[in-house]
């Protein structure tokens, strides 16, 4: 085939409506309780805890496990929070959820998937080997009630908390893999057991149908990819060599992106929030109404050299332009190094004629007077703040703690021997998803 004929064929394929479409069925969960068989009973998720424990202990890298429940409004504090996952299971279509980890290596984002809304599988654990420096799992805290509860979106859902104990002979990286796979298997198991329950709604995720009379918007989703304890996984593999890449919204809904970032709790984008990315949900809802959702560009944050940052950002702008974007929403993950990557992408998109809006955290200092952004460019003239990671939160005494009786010492800001029950003051750094950069925050503020 001549190249000219091949180009014509490619153009014809691109002009067709996209063949990939995902129907995501929602089953609402109002409460979670333990029982002899996992099922839905009148809006209550009954969980067979023994079956969950058996599922996790199939992996010899896990020596033991406790399963607990933390409900909104209870005087409960969860500590050592790592990842959180929403229960989902594939009911029709090729492959399954969490491809590369649970499901086979197949195209995600097609067919039908069920989700259990209102519940999260949250992992709380410590690692078997000592760790220090930047790449260590830091403390992450969720209060289910009281004055500190609004800082985490996970105070609003019922958490099925997995508290595994590591095999002491296992390396930190191997144990990390074990608990990640275990939590994903539990999430799929719960949704699979309840797949036949009554569904309250269905959302179809697709960007295939074009709406040329509406402004075309692309979403730039930055993912942390730095090192163990600060990694994101795409189809089961770390993203260290990832270049800016288009991805279907349905792929993300099916668990193609899995979190492994444990450095600063306030910045975490756990798997649950990738599955429930509020920007993707809203863009899909508005697709064909007041905008034309072009799709998602994923990009690795934390490129190390200036040349790599320029290369990545130029590539992202080229993709956005190729996708016909009139506007772009950009979100980041992590701190200073990643902020440069995001702002450079913003700059090059603006220079290409694409209007941008950036979601960014702030670093204003404890008194609020420091320069708020790690890095900025003149073109970034529409920025939505998700809050500052500085300052302290008063943590009252609670009746019950899940995970450990003491907070985790990290050798940086948290000293040893702080009782987890409280009361104490805790830096915003350690509020689990407290200033989530995907916009999943609970608290808002206005300046007058």
Image (cartoon, rainbow, N blue to C red):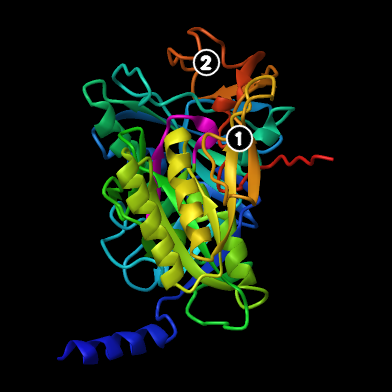
Q: Residue at x 35, y 90 (%)?
A: 12
Q: Choose top left, top right, bottom left or bottom right for residue 76.
A: top right
* Label 1 SS: loop
Relative depth, front residue between 176 and 30 = 176
Q: Residue at x 64, y 52 (%)?
A: 382
Q: Choose top left, top right, bottom left or bottom right for residue 158.
A: top right
Above or below, 271 relative to 66: below
Residue pointed to by mark 2? 405
Q: Can you say which quadrant of the picture contains the N terminus?
A: bottom left
Q: Residues within 10 Å of mark 2 (few under 14, many from 20)?
A: some
> Can see residue 129?
yes
Please provide the residue range marked out in magenta: 254-268
Relative depth, front residue between 431 and 66 = 431
Residue pointed to by mark 1? 434
> Can see residue 251?
no
Q: How many marks?
A: 2
For discs 2 and 1, the disc positioned in front in the rendered view: 1
Residue 213 on the magenta segment: no
Residue extending farthest to the right is: 448
Residue 287 at x, y percent in the picture: 60, 73
Relative depth, front residue between 210 and 34 = 210
Residue 123 at x, y percent in the picture: 45, 35
Q: Choose top left, top right, bottom left or bottom right for residue 64.
A: top left
Above or below, 349 relative to 333: below
Instruction: Give the numbered dot on residue 182.
Output: none
């Amino acid at each position: 085939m001549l190249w000219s004929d091949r180009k014509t064929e490619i153009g014809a394929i691109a002009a067709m409506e996209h063949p990939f479409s995902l129907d995501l069925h929602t089953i609402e969960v109002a409460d979670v309780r333990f029982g002899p068989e996992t099922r839905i009973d009148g809006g209550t998720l009954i969980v067979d805890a023994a079956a969950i424990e058996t599922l996790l202990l199939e992996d010899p890298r896990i020596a033991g496990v406790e399963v607990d429940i933390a409900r909104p409004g209870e005087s409960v504090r969860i500590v050592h929070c790592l990842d959180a996952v929403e229960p989902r299971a594939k009911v029709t279509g090729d492959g399954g959820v969490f491809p590369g980890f649970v499901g086979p290596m197949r195209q995600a984002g097609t067919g039908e998937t069920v989700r259990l809304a209102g519940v999260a599988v949250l992992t709380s654990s410590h690692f078997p080997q000592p760790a220090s420096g930047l790449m260590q799992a830091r403390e992450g805290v969720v209060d289910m009630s009281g004055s500190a509860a609004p800082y985490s979106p996970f105070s609003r859902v019922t958490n099925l908390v997995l508290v595994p104990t590591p095999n002491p002979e296992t390396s930190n990286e191997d144990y990390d893999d074990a608990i990640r796979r275990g939590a994903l298997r539990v999430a799929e198991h719960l949704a699979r057991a309840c797949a036949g329950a009554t569904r309250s709604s269905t959302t179809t995720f697709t960007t295939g149908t074009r709406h040329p009379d509406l402004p075309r918007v692309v979403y730039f989703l930055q993912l942390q990819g730095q090192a163990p304890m600060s990694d994101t996984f795409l189809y089961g593999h770390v993203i260290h060599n990832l270049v800016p890449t288009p991805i279907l919204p349905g792929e993300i809904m099916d668990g193609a992106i899995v979190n492994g970032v444990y450095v600063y709790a306030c910045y975490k984008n756990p798997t649950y929030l990738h599955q429930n990315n509020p920007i993707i949900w809203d863009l899909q809802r508005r697709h064909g109404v007041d905008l034309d959702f072009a799709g998602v560009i994923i990009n690795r944050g934390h490129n190390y050299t200036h040349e790599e940052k320029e290369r990545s950002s130029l590539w992202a702008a080229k993709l956005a332009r190729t996708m016909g974007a009139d506007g772009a929403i950009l979100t980041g993950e992590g701190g200073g190094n990643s902020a440069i990557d995001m702002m450079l992408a913003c700059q090059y998109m603006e220079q290409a004629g694409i209007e941008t809006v950036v979601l960014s955290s702030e670093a204003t200092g404890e008194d609020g007077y420091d320069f708020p952004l790690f890095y900025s460019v003149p073109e970034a003239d529409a920025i939505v703040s998700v809050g500052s990671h500085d300052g302290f939160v008063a943590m009252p005494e609670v009746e019950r703690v899940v995970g450990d009786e003491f907070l985790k010492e990290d050798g940086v800001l948290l000293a040893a021997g702080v009782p987890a029950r409280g009361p104490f003051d805790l830096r915003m750094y350690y509020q689990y998803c407290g200033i989530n950069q995907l916009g999943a925050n609970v608290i808002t503020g206005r300046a007058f």
